[in-house]
């Protein structure tokens, strides 16, 4: 079974929150819920699948995917 890890940059003293997620869609939902603004990485094992950064606020936030 394919599993992913979401690494959220908390920005405080270099802290990183690591969360296991079952799929990419869930990774994006969890990131959207837990990040007001900032960055995260989605990993499959050791491989970085995507780097995401949330911009904007309120009713019109958007994600930049790298």
Image: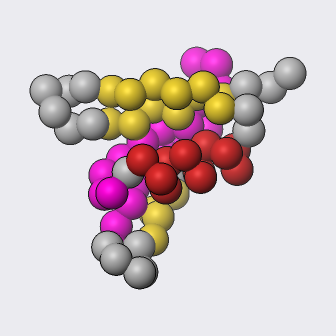
In percent of width and height, residue 25 lies at 70, 50
Q: Main secondary structure of the magenta part?
A: strand
Relative horizontal placement of residue 7, taking residue 44 as reference (left or right): left
- The residue drawn where x is 16% and y is 33% is 12
Q: Quadrant of the N terminus?
A: top right
Is residue 16 something that shows in the picture? yes
- The residue drawn where x is 64% and y is 19% is 45
Residue in front for this viewpoint, 54 or 34: 34
Quarter of image, res 62:
bottom left
Quarter of image, res 61:
bottom left
- The residue drawn where x is 42% and y is 47% is 34
In percent of width and height, residue 44 lies at 66, 27
Can you say whether 29 is above or below 9 in the image? Answer: below
* Range of magenta residues: 36-56
Can you say whether 29 is above or below 45 in the image? Answer: below
Quarter of image, res 5:
top right
Q: Is residue 25 magenta?
A: no
Q: Is residue 38 magenta?
A: yes
- The residue drawn where x is 49% and y is 55% is 32
């Amino acid at each position: 079974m394919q599993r992913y890890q979401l690494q959220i940059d908390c920005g405080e003293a270099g802290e990183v929150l690591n969360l296991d997620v079952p799929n990419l869609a869930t990774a994006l939902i969890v990131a959207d819920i837990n990040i007001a603004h900032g960055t995260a990485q989605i990993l499959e094992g050791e491989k970085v699948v995507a780097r995401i950064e949330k911009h904007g606020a309120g009713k019109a936030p958007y994600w930049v995917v790298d």
